[in-house]
Amino acid sequence: MIARIASLALLTLPLAAPARAIPLDPDHLIRPDLLGRALAALETHRSEADASRLLIVDYARRSSEPRAYLVNLETGLVEEAFRAAHGSGSDPDHDGFLDSFSDVPGSSASPQGAYLIAEEYIGKHGRSIRLDGLDKTNANARDRAIVIHAADYAEPTFLQQWGKLGRSNGCIVFSKADLATFLKAVPERTLVFVGK
């Protein structure tokens, strides 16, 4: 489902000419500061990243809300908005809000910063995607096995029962249906920006 974006505001992408713009989306409310940081990360890693899509994960939102936004950089539309679980070490009281980020091994917390989507593999959660951390704040992503995968605790039935998603060991976790949609839409080397 493609979200139609109103002309609330325009931010010019810091990419090579021709300049493109992403209007802010009132339905999904990508916060301007987070969008700006994500676009700055995309500029920093322009030579490594695929420039067709950008995934912005806004962990300031509660896990019961869509908070992972797939932005089409060619059209300026938010193509999809997904619910995404965060790490248990980032939410010790399990209220559905991420309290803090960490990249410390064994913390079970979600690390923040820019990542590149790497290879797909089949793991204990089925189809999964490895992430390469690009910042000091997520440099241990590969070693910690911080990936994108699906799990039962991110399914709509879990949300209906508990009013929030479950928690991961720091991974970005979608429902199975959302992961399938995501895998179809997102090429390898897409930039992922995780913030709050």
Image (spheres, rainbow, N blue to C red):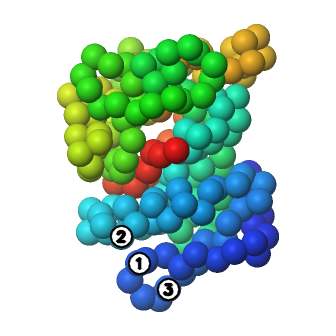
Q: Earlier in the sequence, mark 2 or mark 3?
A: 3
For residue 156, above or below residue 33? above
As shown in the figure, which amino acid type bears the numbered disc 2? Glu
Residue beneath disc 3: 19
Badge 3 crowding class, 10 Å Cα cut-off, few under 14, some 14 to 19, many 20 or more, is few
Number of numbered discs: 3
74 and 86: which one is in front?
86
Could you tell me if the residues under marks 3 and 1 are in contact, i.e. CB atoms within 8 Å? yes
Task: Point out which mark residue 48 bears.
Answer: none
As shown in the figure, which amino acid type bears the numbered disc 3? Ala
Q: Is residue 180 visible?
A: no
Task: Point out which mark residue 43 bears.
Answer: 2
For residue 126, above or below residue 50? above
The residue lying at 49 percent from left, 76 percent from top is 13
Residue beneath disc 1: 15
Q: Earlier in the sequence, mark 1 or mark 2?
A: 1
Q: Percent x, y for residue 171?
A: 42, 28
- The Cα atoms of the two marked residues, 3 and 1, are separated by 7 Å
Horizontally, residue 71 falls left or right of residue 164, namely: left
The residue lying at 64 percent from left, 77 percent from top is 10
